[in-house]
Amino acid sequence: MSGPNKQYDPVEVAALDPAEVEQAVADARQAIAAAGTLDELKAARLAHQGEKSPLALANREIGALPPSAKAEAGKRVGQARGQVSQALAARQAELEADRDRRILVEETVDLTVRVPRRPLGARHPISLVSERVEDIFVSMGWEIAEGPEVESEWLTFDALNIPADHPARQEQDTFFVEPAGSGLVLRTHTSPVQVRTMLDREPPIYVLCPGKVFRTDDLDATHTPVFHQFEGLVVDEGITMAHLKGTLDAFVQRLFGEGIVTRLRPNYFPFTEPSAEIDCRCWICGGSGSLDGEKCRTCGGTGWIELGGSGMVNQRVLRAAGVDTDRYTGFAFGLGIERSLMLRHNVGDMHDIVEGDVRFSQQFGMEI
Amino acid sequence: MHAPVSWLRELADVPADATGEDIAAALVRVGLEEEGLHGGDISGPLVVGRVLSVEPEPQKNGKTINWCTVDVGEHGQRLTEGKPQEIVCGAHNFGVGDLVVCVLPGGVLPGGFQISARKTYGHVSNGMICSQAELGLGDDHSGIIVLTELLGADAAADLKPGDDAIALLDLADEVVEVNVTPDRGYCFSLRGIAREYALSTGAAFHDPAEAPDLVVPQANDHGYAVHLTDDAPLGGRAGCDRYVARVVRGVDVTAASPAWMRKRLTQVGMRPISLAVDVTNYVMMLLGQPLHAFDLDTLSGSVGTRRARAGEKLTTLDDVERLLDPEDLLIVDGADTPLAIAGVMGGATSEVTGTTTNVLIEAAHFDPITVARSSRRHRLTTEASKRFERGVDHAVTAAAAQLAVDLLVGHGGGTADEGVTDVDLRVAAEPFEFDTTLPTRYIGLDYPRAEVLTTLRAIGCEVVEPAGDGAGDTHVAVLPPSWRPDLTDGPELVEEVARVRGYDQIPSVLPQPKAAGRGLTHGQRIRRVVATTLAHQGLVEVLSYPFVAPSLFDRLALPADDERRAAVRLVNPLSDEAPLMRTSVLDTLLDTLRRNVARGSRDVAVYEIGLVTRASSARTSAPVPGIEARPDDATLAAILGAVPAQPRHAAYAAAGELERGGPWGPGRQAEAADAVAWALAVGRSVGLELVVSATDRAPWHPGRCAQLALADGTVVGHAGELHPKVTSALELPPRTVAGELDVDVLVAATGVPLDARALSTYPLAHTDVALVVDEQVAAGDVESALRAGAGESLESVVLFDVYRGEQVGEGRKSLAYRLTFRAADRTLTTDEVSALRDRAVAEAATRTGASQR
Ligand SMILES: [Zn+2]
């Protein structure tokens, strides 16, 4: 490297000549502007900003100038290099933007193709209705109780005041477990869970007993031998049939919609006394029984839909479970989950619910 | 139970303008369920016609039709009015000159059947000659109505062609059909239905058992001999506690029953048969008391009851020879010959036949349980057994017998014996105490004492109030009426009080539990998570019936001693093909998968969560104690202990593509590793890292089956690809994958709050190792060894390559792992990482014989 040379006249250094510097800048600008791609710009950068570029060489000469000339030459070259840098940066930005635009256009994908590559699964709507019903009662401070499906006859019938010779026991089309006389059946309702709960703990009891039950019916559009129920049981001090009605009203409004009310009709069930059939006002026709001048099909024109059975827990049932009947009263009710699903979602055929066709579950997804 | 409105009007003061619908509504209000409303749906022209000519015309189909001309008076089609009408008729039970019933074009028959002139068998038929069935008068399709036969010659004498047949046959009469619940046996009679109608509306009730023209004589000692014995009463109750026997001699049993009686029987759903049978049925329908008519001359001097003897046989009226049971109560004659199963069905030998002239009428009161058991035992539900099972009014016995005698004599001639037998062994019913505040306590609505007492008396109870001023005493003594054996305790009377005021008066009050609920249990929450996790893996939840065939276990290739063969068997399965309860959820889920594939879904992934049943080896039967009080602890334990274990399982199965192919590239078939991954996902979703090990278990492929276990070794389940023989035996797609997990194990293993691990933010250090092992060595075992050897700083182990080839030698494979380390408190140095890796490799060498490549 050459050190300061006092003999040197800056005017004699051609590279530092103002005209030369100006020319170098002009050359650089032209090359930069001419660069049509980022690669060409890279070449222009090397040629006009690199170590061997005229301005870099000029810059190197400044050190050899006498001090008096250094400042001016330094300023001149510095400005020139600044201008080149700016031009490069501006062109770089332009070319990058061009490239990005082009690539993004090229990368366009048709996202309207609706085939799911990894299909989502689904819950069965019976499970979803069941869980929804459970949540409604849990929100009212109740608990959920469960029990076995192969159950003792005593818990399924006797403890519920359905003795062996009672006509009601014949009407329950029961699956019996071998050997005959085993004392075991497939439960025909979830009521044995109620009895288990009462045997298990002291009142107050507020429990919902959902689950699978069995009757020897044939499968058709509205019946299935294996179906799901939820039964409610409350045993507490001062419980009345008005509490039963209040609970049912609150429940149907939360499951079927605001403004739906229930109606109780006298009926007979061995495990309750007094007993009541539960109807709820038809939400399709609003209780009028007709729709667009035709008989409402959902309620058969009656304005009411049968939901299930209910009543005050029979004293005999309470006693069999060891509940103090002088102190406590209770109510119970039972409704079908399949029926609730069919009514709430307009399912026309039981086959769709029980046959396990994935298309049935898939239309509901994960929430109901 | 069917109640014809015209009949009901004789027993209760039904307002003249009340319709069938009004009556049904009144009955529903007090607790009878409306089943239907029949009749009244017929409109004319429906007229009397006289057959003028009958021309039989054989048809190609082998049938012969009759082309008739019928005089229908002034009726008829335009242009033919007043002229004989041409009508085609398929029946043959009539001839020229007979009076028949014709429906003419424009008429409507029950069921909305519109009649018009139509061309048939080459003629234009201007209407139809009607059968009883077509008019809703019964199920007799055998021929058309010939009015002289239906109504009797006298009644038909004044009829002329063109007369309105709707009025003549009372076809406008409606019939209300109600469902009778088991506690209201008395409603299996017009008398009971009328009583309920009166109770509901306040209308006057006229008891047909106390009709002014029904004169019931006192019993005397010269009636037909009756001997009641019962050496094995059920539950201490005599099989028969009242038996009335009456004799009518010289009856013409071939005489026709009166038309009104036959019509009423038809309306209530019974077929008119013969005078003796029709009379007993009519009285039963009116009063609810089943009767039996014997041919007196077949009996040997007396009748009575006794329990059957083992091995004894009786041929019942339905021509079935029945082997009797010592619990069956029999009616026997003086020679001890069985005549009938009491309250269920009579025998063939003593049946009233066409040659019978002397008839014995039996009206008795039998024990409900005895009748119920006999009826069930012999699979014989009759009109009589239905009523006795539910309880018959034991006070109506003599009146019912008298009414039958009157009707027999009235329509069949003959005379009734003066002797009247009434063996009455009834135990007087005791009143029970009733707290008149109970309705208010139970219903939550105020029922004043006066209202309670009025209602109880209205339903027929005798109510005795305490002597003295009774101030402060809310109890009364109540004796329910003889027709209400169901009323035995306070709550039953509460229902009566509540239903008479009306259930619609009950207010709606939401009860508030005093203590807040505990929400879902841990197990219920875990189950929901498992279900949701599987759905999020792309599996679809389905349900299947839990019934399986014994041969399924062979098709699943379960070993002979496999615990899953210990299935609970049903006595009366839905199908004899599938009498067992499933022992795994896969037992039935796989068939659901098959059905989906059969329906055209090529790519299916399903799961089900449900109970499985394993028969316990102990096989004790569950005791059935009484229900007067809570069973003692030992009995309760025996009941609960006899119920087999029913763990909750989650099972899944998939076939076809899990990831779909398309314009973006090829799809990916479900493979064994997916089945394992789903199990691991289920574990992770509840905070458990399941341990995978290779195993061989049916129904899986022996080389593609993984066992999933908890860290302590407890088995959770299995997953993998099904055995090719199983997929072919079950008609599943090849390469179907499946898994089954015990959810109860997952529940038991969770529930303790997890201690969170502190996160280190020091840099990661990666190092790769390639380990050569024997082909049989499971990658999972190598990984476990690496983890054990590397210690706590190891953050992850990932297998990223498996190589087989010359360089590693025959029967060996090279597993390439990336180990990632991170210390909790510092940046690890290169030397530290190398040392940790060497320890990991050394452990793998010790445990699996691995050598570093
Ligand atoms: Zn409606």
Image (tube, grey):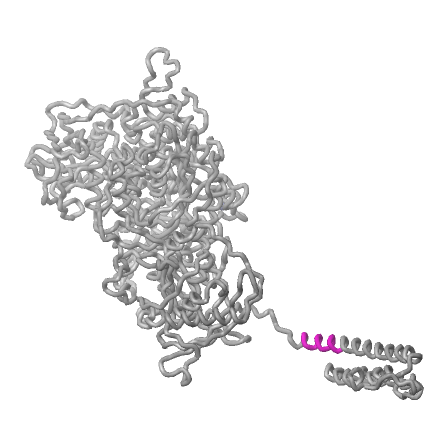
Residue positioned 41% across, 20% down in the render: B449
Q: Which sits in the foreground, A314 or B404?
A: A314
Question: What range is drawn magenta here?
Answer: A95-104
Magenta segment's dominant SS is helix
Q: Is residue A255 magenta?
A: no
Query: How far across and down, in percent of the image, does residue A202 sit?
Result: 38, 35
Residue positioned 17% across, 31% down in the render: B238
Image: A203 above or below B777: above
Query: How far across and down, in percent of the image, does residue A296 sit?
Result: 49, 47
Q: Quadrant of residue A321?
A: top left
Residue positioned 44% across, 54% down in the render: A348
Say if residue A215 shows up in the picture. Answer: yes
Total marks drawn? 0
- Is residue A220 found left or right of B239 in the rendered image? right
Query: How far across and down, in percent of the image, does residue B557 sit?
Result: 28, 67
Image: A92 above or below B710: below
Q: Which sits in the foreground, A115 or B787?
A: B787
Query: How far across and down, in percent of the image, does residue B539 sit?
Result: 45, 62
Q: Quadrant of residue A154?
A: top left
